[in-house]
Amino acid sequence: MDIAESLGRLALFADLSPSQVEAIAHSNEEDVFAEGERVLRRGLSGGNFYVILDGEAAVRVGDAELSRLGRGDYFGEISALTNDPPSADVVAITVLRCLVIPASRLEQLLLERPQVMLRLLRMEARRLQSAVEWRT
Amino acid sequence: MADLDRPFPPGSYDVVVVGSGPGGLQTSYWLRHLGVSHAVLSRDEAPGGMFQRFPIFQRLITWTKPDAPVERTTREYEWYDHNSLLAEEQDLKALVPSLMDRAYDLPSRAEMEAGLAAFAEKAKLEVRYGTTWESTHHDGDRITLVTDAGAYRCRAVVFALGVTEPWRASVPGLEHAAHYVDTWSPERYAGRSVFIVGKRNSGFEVAQGILPWARSIILGSPRPVQTDALALSALRIRYLHPYDEYARGGPGTYVLDVTISRIDPTADGFHVVTHGTVWDGRLEFDVDDVIAATGFRTPLRDLPALGLVTVNDGRVPALTPFWESVTLPGVYFAGNASQGAKGLGKRGAGASSSSVNGFRYNALVLARHLAERLNGHTRPRRPVDDVVTFLLRELSSAPELWVQKGYLCRVVTAEDGGYLDDEVEPLAHFLDSGGPDALAASVEVNESGTIVPTLYVRRHGEIAEHQLEPHPLHDYEGEPYRRQLASLLGLQG
């Protein structure tokens, strides 16, 4: 399955036409990480937005695991949008295949494709909601 | 040649290197330098790899400046000469500039090939030519390569095979088109209309090559041409005449952001159906020729069947920071395929591992890694007397850091109240491996494409990143930098 086909199956891009998805696939790089490799590093600048095409990753702060991510999940959006370094590490738990969208291109993509922005916003709202519920 | 006279008969070696292009030659040179027993096999009959055939129309895209403010035998000169292989011996350094006709600051293909052949000969690098790797057995800690000469067993293999096998994107009908590799002799496009699929370097190279001949040229692919942050761009402006013409509204040359839905052969050419990617709409073309400039892949043979995982639509192996397959232990890649290790990719910036200037440094780091892993080699660690001066000089002129921006870094480690030089490492390894207090210097590029000297400080296992101020002449050795660095390190300025 090529990258465009993998992306087209993900919820984040479900509202886009095949050529719009293909443009995203071709305008960004794919990267594959070994089991145990760090993908996003807490405290370091220049982090990208990652969409998981295959495999599993853990969000960690120190030794504490905050959550697990799998196919179709994404990470790095907060630091990509705020330009602040990430507040957690993301580590590949299995061989992990991602589409890597640099921050500058993420901003451009969200402005050009409001359907993707809306889906991202909904997911952020859900994450915020569950974080609030967890604390109360 | 009688088989007995040939080097590297089948048998057991610590390492087997496959390939005699720049990646294979450079790796073999450093392995020999570090005393690692190895064989070098090549299916070719002579050194040079892809430069025996490519690039077809144009010169290389990486510069070599025969005259520079520093001597050709210095380490700093490597930043002025991106095409020579590296060596310790003075007479093996900077071989390409002396072979150039100076028509341009880019060597021609033939000059590059001659430089590689001269390196192999002068360095007396042994290669078993005319030997083809056919299949592979991987049993955990031993690897067997079956060749037409017999079997080679090793603890690690370094494939330096290039990224040279024509690859076509999955566009219906593209299989009917000529590939970039079939486009020798631009005269054949005289008076013809040509659709080129692909807008990366090979697409623009062939477009520029046939620009004086073709009646009209359309370049089409989904990805827009990005020239806003050139330091971050994989696309080199060396071949961008066709884009310049299109940007000025020049008739007959078009550079389009489109997906190509299908290519139908017709009685006298091709019908191409496209859809806009950054604009809505459909364009159809009737052209005489279609050329697939969709790139190349590494000839991996049976490795994917053994579990080797790839990136870039299956075109290159997915690699760790030390260029080992992420799934097949002991299987390493050098040369152009080392681009499968992408590093941190901060702000989307890639390493320069797809060209000689970058992968020649990877080869030394890889050879040292193999020497340490297989032979227990320990690198000599020279004391660094004045750490501030040392790091600022590295940031200003270390060719490894300047070519492999954000991928390779210079490391010094604190020990007994002073610092020891730990040489050049992949930055990802420094950041993730842990260890004693240490510093790493790296040259990076910010969002707007400005070059930023960057320092990573590891204290008690925690890493802190510090970006120093950019400088218009990229000279970071002045007093403000000295003060800033001294204060970061808790030293008196």
Image (spheres, rainbow, N blue to C red):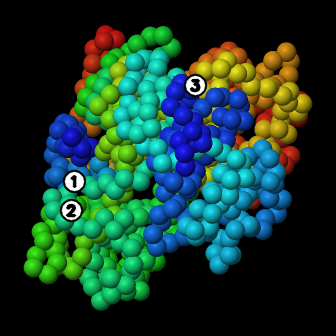
Residue type marked 1: Ser
Q: Quadrant of the C terminus of chain B?
A: top right
* Marks 2 & 3 on one chain: yes
Q: Mark 2 sits on what residue?
A: B174
Disc number lying in front (2 or 3): 3
Q: Quadrant of the rendered structure where residue A76 is?
A: top left
Residue type marked 2: Leu
Distance from the alpha carbon under mark 1 to that under mark 3: 40 Å
| A116 vs A19: above or below | above
| B473 vs B128: above or below | below
Disc number lying in front (1 or 3): 3
Residue type marked 3: Asp
Residue B70 visible in the snapshot: yes
The reply to whether callout 2 and callout 3 are in contact (CB within 8 Å) is no
* Marks 1 & 3 on one chain: yes
Tag shown at residue B170: 1
Please tell me whether mark 3 sits on a helix, a strand or a loop. strand
Tag shown at residue A15: none
B162 or B154, which lies in front?
B154
The reply to whether callout 2 and callout 1 are in contact (CB within 8 Å) is yes
B219 or B481, which lies in front?
B219
Q: Mark 3 sits on what residue?
A: B14
| B436 vs B269: above or below | above
**Residue at image location 78% in from the left, 44% down from the top:** B88
| B204 vs B493: above or below | below
